[in-house]
């Protein structure tokens, strides 16, 4: 049954107390039930925030100007709003809601603002960092399912900073992509590559988000890590990262990304390993071994739905149902 | 007593359920108690919004890109975030919180994004609209206090659209300001000027906010009005507007600005009035008479504090006190 078009409310003499239901009523003209629900929750929270803080006109204007500044510093290679979402814990939350992980699988971590779509496809064994100042690191990884079977043909986006703690896109003179690549797992689920040992680095702090962190008395550092993103049809996209144990920012990551299961110990490349991966020059260099475990899309969707239903039932927001896996209010 | 520096929490293994208190704990390092409170409320609402809607990764990214687009279309003469705040009812709410009006005074209305700081000071009787296509309108106004005494020397910013429904700043070839001016009330509290009869107009709908309104099934029109902003030391700044009775958008203003007390009837200039205001060419033209009533800063501050205390007591957010008229949590 199509929803009955709501009557347009009379918008007159709006006050602190009646502006919220009236805004929601006029937005209820929206034909898309999901967008209607999103707007109803957004407006309610936004207005409650203003009422609870008695937000001053100066604070309101400062906030709007902050948002303009975030938009204006953003570009093809910088997304200040992702950074803002990251430091407010929202990115971690969105990832956790959308990519729940069964116990046997690899946990997710924040995507961050530095993934690009121009990373070169490279064959196994390639060098993905051109930085001669970095400490060489051989990474030897596998991709498996939760029962331990290899997953062949998964594409793996990999990206890290150079030894100065900057991603390629942070260099004004960036020509070609560097410190990033896309690999494909082989028929035994393996992929391996030459990288550099990651270093801790500050997130971009020359913009509005950096100023906010400073006013909050927070540092802007992330512990050393290597980003990974796995994709293969039928498998839930895995965005994750591996963190180097012992980093001084291990438990105070500015963007809340670290999970204990993602903290790794580096080893040294021995002669047998150097030979096996045809990397004689790396004998004695850093070695990172890791096995990643993917979850099927089907299993993830079922878990996400179950989590959503349980959480919504506890919230007392009225009768909701999942449509395309996303909650919308039940029509009576 | 200075507040005890909070212990930095260990940020590890953050989840849907523990990300909010942990984000709030790390933000609690902020030395400014007001900013601490604003952030605590902001993060809590933002996270609750994501949890209640199970916001999808695609929706999250669409929202962040929407915010970038709002920032990028903004300029010295366009503030898309004010427009967004307007259509979400937030601007009306902020104005109502900050400028409560005792019964005897003129109500406020939304500032909108079209006030500028380059309007020319003009003497009484001046023509503030250069648009020959507009219907001439003589405005004859007074500024008084709540006991009826004239308020002399108040500066009055006045702005309206041209007859096509556009503010000067919406024209790409804008040279000098037009359809705007700053007047000063005379010793009898009077100010008068030549304008044009306001017309209804769409708010700028070629940007992200216009697209949002369309997706919500809302129109983007404002009823015909004339903006006024009054300032004088010791008096609460009054941002308001007068709306023409009978406008087709009178009760569906896209930005929620209309109040019954601000809807006015136009009259016609008679011979005596034309003579009194030295405007013989305007005999028979439209006439707008209005008396504005200002409230002292002191009275407004007291009323705002009382409203805040009453509202906060009802919210059950714990013990709050007003510092510089703005709520912050009590330290035990």
Image (cartoon, coloured by chain):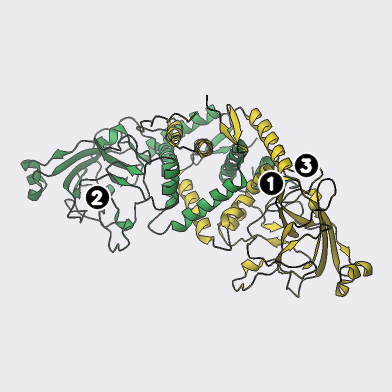
Chain colours: A yellow, B green
B61 or B196, which lies in front?
B61
- Up the image or down, B73 lies above or below B209; here it is below
Locate residue A146 relative to residue B202 in the image: left or right. Answer: right
- Please provide percent x and percent y for residue B175: 28, 64
Q: Chain of mark 3?
A: A
Kindly check if marks 2 and 3 are in contact, taking CB atoms under 8 A apart as contact: no
For mark 3, what is the residue? A102
* Residue shown at the point (39%, 35%) measured from the top left: B100
Q: Is residue B293 visible?
A: yes
| Number of other residues with Cα within 10 Å of mark 3, as a class: few under 14, some 14 to 19, many 20 or more | some
Label 1 secondary element: loop
Label 2 secondary element: strand
Locate residue A81 relative to residue A16 in the image: left or right. Answer: right
- Please provide percent x and percent y for residue A69: 50, 57
Quarter where residue B87 is shown = top left
Kindly check if marks 3 and 1 are in contact, taking CB atoms under 8 A apart as contact: no
Cα separation between marks 2 and 3: 70 Å
Front label number (3 vs 1): 3
Locate residue A62 relative to residue B246 in the image: left or right. Answer: right
Quarter where residue B237 is shown = top left
For the C terminus of chain B, the image quarter is top right
Q: Chain of mark 1?
A: B
Q: Chain of mark 2?
A: B
Label of residue B5 in the image: 1
For mark 2, what is the residue? B184
- Up the image or down, B170 lies above or below B274; here it is below
Of callouts 1 and 2, which one flags the residue occurring earlier in the amino acid sequence? 1
- Please provide percent x and percent y for residue B192: 18, 47
Cα separation between marks 3 and 1: 38 Å
- Please provide percent x and percent y for residue B69: 48, 55
């Amino acid at each position: 049954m199509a929803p009955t078009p709501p009557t347009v409310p009379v918008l007159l003499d709006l006050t602190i107390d009646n502006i919220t239901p009236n805004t929601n009523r006029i937005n209820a003209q929206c034909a898309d039930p999901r967008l209607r629900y999103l707007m109803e929750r957004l407006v309610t929270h936004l207005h409650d925030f203003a009422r609870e803080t008695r937000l001053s006109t100066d604070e309101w204007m400062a906030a709007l100007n902050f948002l303009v500044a975030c938009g204006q510093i953003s570009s093809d290679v910088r997304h200040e709003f992702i950074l803002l979402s990251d430091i407010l814990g929202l990115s971690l939350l969105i990832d956790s809601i959308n990519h729940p992980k069964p116990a046997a699988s690899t946990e997710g971590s924040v995507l961050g603002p530095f993934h690009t779509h121009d990373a070169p496809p490279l064959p196994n064994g390639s060098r993905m960092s051109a930085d001669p100042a970095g400490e060489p690191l051989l990474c030897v990884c596998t991709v498996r399912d939760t029962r331990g079977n290899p997953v062949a043909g998964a594409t793996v986006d990999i990206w890290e900073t150079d030894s100065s703690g900057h991603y390629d896109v942070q260099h004004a003179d960036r020509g070609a992509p560097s410190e990033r690549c896309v690999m494909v797992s082989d028929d035994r689920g393996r992929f391996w590559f030459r990288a550099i040992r990651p270093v801790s680095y500050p997130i971009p702090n020359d913009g509005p988000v950096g100023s906010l962190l400073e006013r909050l008395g927070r540092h802007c550092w992330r512990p050393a890590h290597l980003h990974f993103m796995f994709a293969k049809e039928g498998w839930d996209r895995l965005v994750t990262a591996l963190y180097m144990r012992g980093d001084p920012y291990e438990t105070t990551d500015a963007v809340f990304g670290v999970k204990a299961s993602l903290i790794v110990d580096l080893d040294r490349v021995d002669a047998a390993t150097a030979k096996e991966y045809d990397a004689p020059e790396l004998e004695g260099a850093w070695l990172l071994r890791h096995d990643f475990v993917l979850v099927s899309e089907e299993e993830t969707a079922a878990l996400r739905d179950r989590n959503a239903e349980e959480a919504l039932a506890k919230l007392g927001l009225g009768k909701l149902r999942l449509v395309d896996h996303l909650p919308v209010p039940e029509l009576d």
